[in-house]
Amino acid sequence: MNESVRHLREQMTLTEKASLTSGANFWNTKPVPRLGIPSIMLTDGPHGLRKQGGAADHLGLNSSIPATCFPTAATLANSWDAELLHRVGEALGDEAAAESVSVLLGPGLNIKRNPLAGRNFEYFSEDPLVSGALAAAFIRGVQSRGVAASAKHFAVNSQETHRMSIDEIVDERALHEIYLEGFRLAITGGDAWTVMSSYNKVNGTYANENRELLDGILRRRWGFDGLVVTDWGGNNDRVGGLVAGNALEMPSTGGVTDREVVRAVEGGTLDAAVLDARVDEVLALIEKTSPRGAAPADLDAHHELAVEAARQSIVLLANRAGTLPLGPGAGRIAVIGDFAETPRFQGAGSSLVNPTRVDSALDALQAAGLDIVGYEPGFARRDAASTRLRRRALALAARAEAVLLFLGLDESAEAEGVDRAHMRLAQNQLTLAEDLIALGKPVIVVLAGGSPVELPFAERVDAIVHGYLAGQGGGRAIVEVLTGVVNPSGRLAETYPLRYADVPSSKAFTKTEATSEHRESIYVGYRYYDKVGAPVRYPFGHGLSYTAFSYADLVADATTARVTVTNTGDRAGAEIVQFYVEAPDAAAGVFRAPRELRGFVKVRLEPGASATVDVALAEHAFDVFDVAAGDWRTVAGSYAVLAGASSRDIRLSASVEIAGDTGSEADTAQLPHYVSGHVEQVTSTEFEALLGSPLPTPDWSTGRALTRDDIVAQTKGRGGFGGLLYFLIDTSSDVLMRLRRPLAANNTRFVLDLPFRSIPRLSGGKFDDDMLVGLLLMVNRRFFRGARHLIGAALRLRARNSRNPKAN
Ligand code: BGC
């Protein structure tokens, strides 16, 4: 252990130690001036700095200083380009360092389990290898500037609904193979200095107090020696968190939980050595990341990098009869769709960046030398009948020879704290699209959004370009792709299902209240669709180019795959070569996905040029997580290593004999749907057989009294004061939506999802645990008794505060 850290810690009092492990305010740690220990700042976020000067919040409500808004993770993932992620990380590290920010709260790398999850736009992929490899490169980039990255949200933060209380029920295999594997790769490969624990529970225990996750897996199995920070307000039991491995609670609780720590050490319920270990982690982080007066960041260069990142990430989904690129012969073009003028380039919530500038596609189109006959928004941004706008758009299209139609999810559709209600585009956009298609002219759709949408018109339009959420330079990059200045090379890092009902978790997702059962186990995304042979709109890994590539000479062994790729077209372009491993049938009694991504590389080639690429296969390419043994196990057999351009466009196959270990073979007789892959039909009994334990009750009991560990939303339908409280908060959300303040409306969701015990901690000393006792009596239909208790406690608190103003 670091000597200077130990030396400092030895001089600290118990109170100082307890206070060092929680925040001073919303974004800073506490200094210890007596010992010269400075405060450091932690700030979002994953694709741009969100440093707040004035009022602070973690939901994107109050403003932050201007910073470069890079494409979000869901977009950057489509580049499959670790080197690009490294450069973006470096730029973010530079901006953070220039602003004296020590910890950048990103990357977010939860698995995109279900298309409706509200923060999908902040996450990379449905596949752990893509997520982990790209996150590792990003982390190395940020940290090369002396700024810590924070891999978040650890772990299984699969949904926003009730994110502060939901119990994510997931079997051990899926946990390790799908939900943890990306983190493992990011944390070990990227050497992350910090990890952010998630709000939710994992199999019954809050992630932040989960010893198995934070100590057993993160530290002991993976060798992590950095610091675990809570998500904001995500501490449930401070002492339990310290024991599990959490070293920093954010934001400040006004000293409430520091006093709990002091009492626990004094009372012997918390080993002083545990607190010392956590203090060392905070001190080591401060030492590593204290601002060193970095030069201002080059924001012009970063804007150019944001454009470049978007260029590499945009995906050409469809292109019939060479509609694109648009050349001089494209004729008169009508530009339709609000997103052309006002790009949707990022999501809402804590990752919301105040961009230094924004390039709109409309401006770039007008500068591109195309024959643009005009622009019409065509629809109201937030779904509403838009007859007048639609008519004007159709009139414009009538004067054109082709239509460029910009569609997408609006700002309220993808936000932290809220999951989407459906997978469709707004009805006014769909209606307009159908009317334009009916004109019989070429229609080229440009999409915006960080997560799959149903595309009912996909077979009836001429081309589809997906910009995802392309950051502040996205508008320019999209036009470069449309006009062929850039040859698109992005490939989907997730599957586009035909319709929401096809998603394996569609029935289970956010339907229950207290638990979220991951019944589909390992069959997330393409692992499911490919297993059952379900038709999809676009497979995982799909994306077109203006040139074509051929594959030859695949050679593979247990560790490496090699293939030769040739650009057979007449333009320079880039191919993303994907290597999948196909497990032998019924290998050793374990159920398997038919093929899994085990390596990838982006190859840039001039017309006619070839390259031979060697790719190291992923560490667990031929393994399963053996639950009985509690470790990975190589399964012996005859495997196929496949090289392809998507999970469904396999070009070559090579067979590889793998020697394996014999393990404890699971009894698959009780798991018929896991064997067939039809996990949408898994019953509770079958899921229990997989879990090896009975399922917790999924629903909130409405009969019992609410406790401090319940959440505010549980007051719903209780009648009395509780019911009224729910009604008022819920109604204020509706009112704010009507007032077109979707981000403020999200904040009310945050309040509803808050556990009661968090109210004193987040109140800044204005509401204490004794007052909470009164509030709980009130919501539990003992209004008058509760109100008397609450008022009495409030008066006592006020008196204490005025006697000792520094207590908080
Ligand atoms: C989010 C985190 C974020 C933090 C600080 C939380 O609400 O879940 O991702 O880093 O706020 O803004």
Image (cartoon, rainbow, N blue to C red):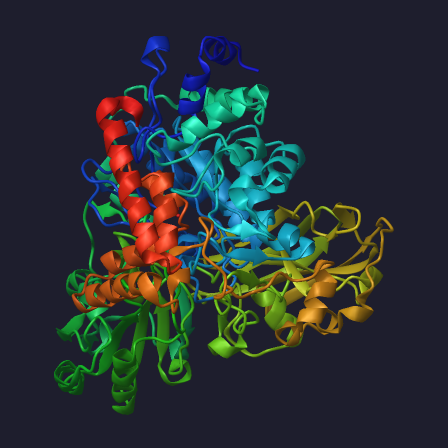
Please indicate, yes or no, whether residue 782 appears anywhere in the rendered image: yes
Number of callouts? 0
Residue at 48% across, 21% down: 279
Quarter of the figure with the C terminus: top left
Taking 512 as reference, is 744 above or below it?
above
Measuring from the top left, give residue 705's x and y in whole percent: 47, 58
The residue at the far right in this view is 662
Instruction: Name the foreground residue: 411 vs 232.
Output: 232
Tell me if residue 235 comes above or below residue 257 in the rendering. below
Judge whether residue 347 can be spotted in this image: no
In this picture, residue 425 sits left or right of residue 540:
left
Taking depth in this image into account, of 243 and 375 the one nearest to the observer is 243
Residue drawn at x 41%, y 17% is: 16
Q: Which of 203 and 133 is in front in this view?
A: 203
Ligand 1 occupies quarter: top left
Vertical relation: 467 (above or below) 636: below
**In the picture provided, is 740 more to the left or to the right than 625?**
left
Q: Position of residue 515 (x, y in %)?
A: 54, 61
Locate the N terminus by quadrant.
top right
Picture quadrant where residue 433 is located: bottom left
- Residue at image x 56%, y 28%? 225
735 sits left or right of 285 in the view: left
Left or right of 307: which side holds 700? right
x, y percentage for residue 283? 45, 20
Residue 711: give x, y in percent of width and height.
42, 55
